[in-house]
Structure formats: C-alpha cells, structure tokens
Image (spheres, rainbow, N blue to C red):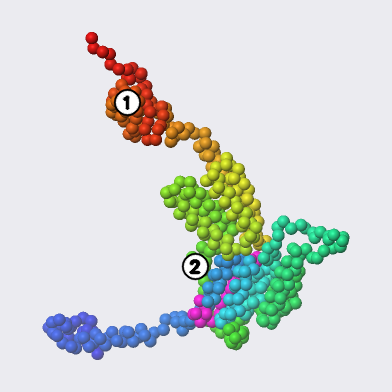
Amino acid sequence: MIRNARCLLSGVTSRSGRRRCSIARTGSAFCPRRVLALFALLFGALALWTPPGAAQAGRTAPVLLIDGAIGPATSDYVVGGLERAAEENAPLVVIRMDTPGGLDSAMRGIIRAILRSPVPVVTYVSPSGARAASAGTYILYASHVAAMTPGTNLGAATPVQIGGGNPFAPPQQEKDKDGKDGTAPAAGAAEAKAINDAVAYIRSLAELRGRDADWAEAAVRTAASLSASAALERNVIDLVARDTDDLLEQLHGRTVVAGGKEITLDTRNLVLAEVAPDWRARFLGTITDPNVALILMMIGVYGLLFEFMNPGALYPGTIGAICLLTGLYAFAVLPVNYAGLALILLGIALMAAEAFSPSFGILGIGGFVAFVLGAAILIDTDVPQFRIAWPVLGAVALASLAMTVVIARLALVSHRRKVVSGREEMVGAEGTVLGWKDGAGHVFVHSERWRARGPGGLAAGAAVRVTALDGLTLAVEPIDMDAAAPPAAAR
C-alpha cells in the first residue's frame, strides 16, 4: 500500500523503473482510482475536522454603544441593532452606556425597541466614571438586566422643556381684575404635566422589571442620583460588574422574560462583539447636530439666491437645494420651536426679496434680524448637546450680514451705473456709414447694422452720431460737418 502510494506520487509503477504511472501514456485506470481515493480521504478529513472555536459558533452577542447625548441617530442605531440581533437569534444584546441624557422622542424609541425585543437586553453603564443620567436612567430601568461598573452613577431624570414652552412668557402670573391670584401659570402647568407624565412612565418601567419604583419617582421629581453600589442596595439595578468578563459570569444562569417567554441566560464561552454605527447612522448623527443643520440651511438659502440672481449657473442652485433639503430634514427630526422656525422662514423670504427687489439693504437687514432671532430659539430643548452654540450663531449672523451688505452694495452700484441698453443708451452713440443714398441708408453702431436717415450728403465710411431713435430707425448726423457738405460745382 505504501509502495502504491509512493508510486502514485513519483509516477513509478515497476521495480525496474521501465514503466511510469502516467494516465496519458498507459491509459491504465489504476492511478485515477488511487488519486480519487486520496482526494476523498483528504476531503473527508477536512469535513470531520473542527477548527478551534467552531463549537462556539452562534455564541456571539452584539454590543451596542451609547456614548454621548441620545438623539435621533442614537435611536436609529440602537433600534436597528436590536432588530438585527433578533433576526440573527443572538443569545443577548449588551448596551454599553455613558450618557448625560438626550431627547425624549429618541429615548422613547429606544425603550419601545427594548420592550418588544425577543432578545434579552443587558444595559451596562461603563467604564468607571460613566453615567446614566436623565434619559439613560429610563433606558436602564427598561432593560431586562441593569448593570453598572463601580465608579458610575445614574439619576437626575427630571424632564426639561419637553414639548417646549413660550420663550416670551412673563416670569410670574399676573393677578386678575379682582386682585386675586389667577390660575397656575401656563409654564408651570406645562412643567407639572411633563413631570407627572415622566413619573408615570418610569414607574411603569420599574414595576415591569421589579425594581424600586419609589426611587425612580424621586429621580424624576427631585433629580435624585445614586452611585452603583447604592443603586444595587436600593434594587434599582440588578448587578455591579467590574468588567465584561465579570458581567458575563454574573449573567450566567439568570432568568429573564423577553418577548413573553422566560429565558435562562447561558453566557459560558460567549463572545461579545462591538457593533459600530454604520454610515447611515454616522451621517444622521452629523446632520442632526443643530449647528450643522443651521449651516446647511444657510448654504442652501444663499445657493438658491445666487442661482436666481444668475440663472444658468447650476452649481449654486444644485448645491443649495441639496443643503437646504438636508437641513430641513435634520430639523424635522429635532425638537423645533415653531416660533423660531417661522422667524427663520420670514428671514429667508425677506433676504430673497432683497435679491429680487433691491431696497438698499432694508429688507436684507430685516431678514438678517429675523433669521438670527429664529435661530436663537429654534431648538426647543435644554439638552446642551442639542442647542445651537453661540459661536456658530454669531458666525452665521456675520455671514448673513456680510451677504446682505454685498447685495445692497451691488444694488446701489447698479442704480448709479449709466444705462447700457435701450433708447437712452443709443442716443449719442457713434457709428460708421455702411451705405447711403437720398438721405437714408445703413449704419454700423454698437457692432450692429441699423437702418438710418439723415443728411443727403453722407458717404460710405463717414462717421456719424445718433441723435434719435424712431422704432428701429436711427436719426444720425455727421460728426465731421464737412462730410455732409455737397461737392463744389465744377468750373
């Protein structure tokens, strides 16, 4: 057998070496069968061989990252990650969180996705020094398992300016005509309404997960906060883990209810894999920055204005339309104050009117003021990460003012400029006679051929000046009066 295998490899089939094992020369079926058998053994061994870690296939859990303020992009990223985990039948999902809070609509979108997820969701506040403040506290309460690392904190879940208010409202309610105090101020009523709604929401989450509902209410009403160890003692969270290995070890064997079913977590040999945001989430996160959205809107407005002032340029109009629509989409998913939006639209309209009906800057300056005021109150939230920065607002204001000054200056220069077309421009223009007979002919003025009438003595090549315009016929006179004099009689 060994000799035959060696023969297969070397091609020698006889002891004397006279015959070679060549299919092409001998046509024997002996060698092909040996070759096929050898390949069958190799493929069988490969099929039976299990590479290291293959026994753990399917034992990977995704890790979603919430780092920073929670906005539309964060919500889209987390909701999409939970949906993919459900499609792939992941054993669990870990949300590693460090957030100061965020927008109410984005937070509720994430919580809805967690509550309907058939895959257990473990929210882990990490690393040390991280926090789950405001919106992060709600997400922690909604998770199937709430965990924190030592040196972290949660709480301060009081809602701020949910739904907005009137920025021009007086600080105190005036008394009625009888001198008695009136009803509660509108701003106070709106604040109480938002707080009561938030209390009911977080208490429902606490009762659903069997956690301390009283402290949850205190976190909303009095902005209470807890450290990781204190939260564990108060039954606000389920466990404190030093790192992910410790987290997986403590999760093993824990039973949770997800998707209406009891699931016992098996975290032995489980591998955690971070899932980075895709290009769509990163793009959404960029344009939903209110500062970026405002700049995009400004570029869009001025791009369209330049296109309207110079039809056919194409580039300003195309870029402007794209930027304007992108900026409007960003504002559509952000909490917007409608008074601010109305002021911005008014400012755009006034600046456009300045471009088409120059008023020496009056409309432009009015549009600039309206635009700046609207931008200042546009975003209706107290979350610092989702407010327009004053340096950006100042830069946009200066750019708008500069553009208004440029447009006004161009309008003033155009108003003072000499007329370059029409009847006023033709009178006084000089030209050359092309042909002349009986006081009429053709002249060349402003690189154009015109019919003309004038003195009868003009000849071709004579210089003339336009004195009047009658329809499409010019009245001309010779510049050199001698050119129009009749020739002297021969003696």
Viewer-nearest residue: 321 or 103: 321
Rendered view: 312 above or below 463: below
Q: Which residue is located at x 52 percent, y 71 percent?
A: 275
Query: Residue 229: x, y in percent?
Result: 70, 74
Which span is picked out in magenta? 84-102
Secondary structure of the residue carrying tag 1 is loop
The residue wearing badge 2 is 278
Viewer-nearest residue: 305 or 117: 305
Q: Is residue 331 left or right of residue 318?
A: right
Viewer-nearest residue: 50 or 331: 331
The residue wearing badge 1 is 439
Q: Which residue is located at x 62 percent, y 63 percent?
A: 335
Secondary structure of the residue carrying tag 2 is loop
Q: Is residue 88 magenta?
A: yes
Rendered view: 258 above or below 393: below
In space, the residues marked 1 and 2 are separated at their CA atoms by 82 Å
